[in-house]
Amino acid sequence: MVLSYAALPGETTAELIGQALEQVPIKQVWAWCRRHLGTILRSQRVAARRAVQSCCPA
């Protein structure tokens, strides 16, 4: 919840972000990222490469 304050209009400082990160456990930050940001392109490429390698070994 604290991290959501950074999304509000207004000034976001490094100090504010630092305070938010100190107050929120890293597991909650990662869960929020997965829920709201989804899979990044690099992770999608790695997953696709693994899928191809598992079905069609070189």
Image: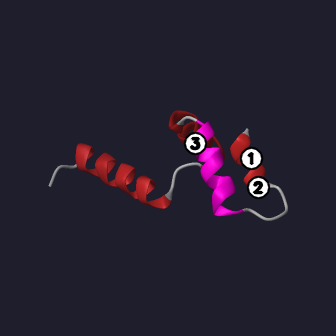
Name the main secondary structure of what is drawn in magenta: helix
Q: Residue at x 76, y 55 (%)?
A: 7
**In the displayed structure image, the side of residue 52 where residue 27 appears, left or right:** right
Q: Is residue 29 magenta?
A: no
Amino acid at pointer 3? Glu
Where the N terminus falls, by quadrant? top right
Q: How is the image coloured?
A: secondary structure
> In the rendered structure, are the residues bearing label 3 and label 1 in contact, judged by CB atoms less than 8 Å apart?
no
Look at mark 1 in the image and give the residue it sits on.
4
7 versus 20 height, above or below: below
**In the displayed structure image, the side of residue 23 where residue 54 appears, left or right:** left
Q: Residue at x 52, y 50 (%)?
A: 39
SS state under label 2: helix
Residue 28 placed where, x, y %?
A: 58, 35
Residue 9 placed where, x, y %?
A: 85, 61
Compare marks 3 and 2 and give the one earlier in the sequence: 2
- Between 43 and 54, the residue placed more toward the observer is 43
Disc ID at residue 7? 2
Q: CA distance from mark 2 to mark 1?
A: 5 Å
SS state under label 3: helix
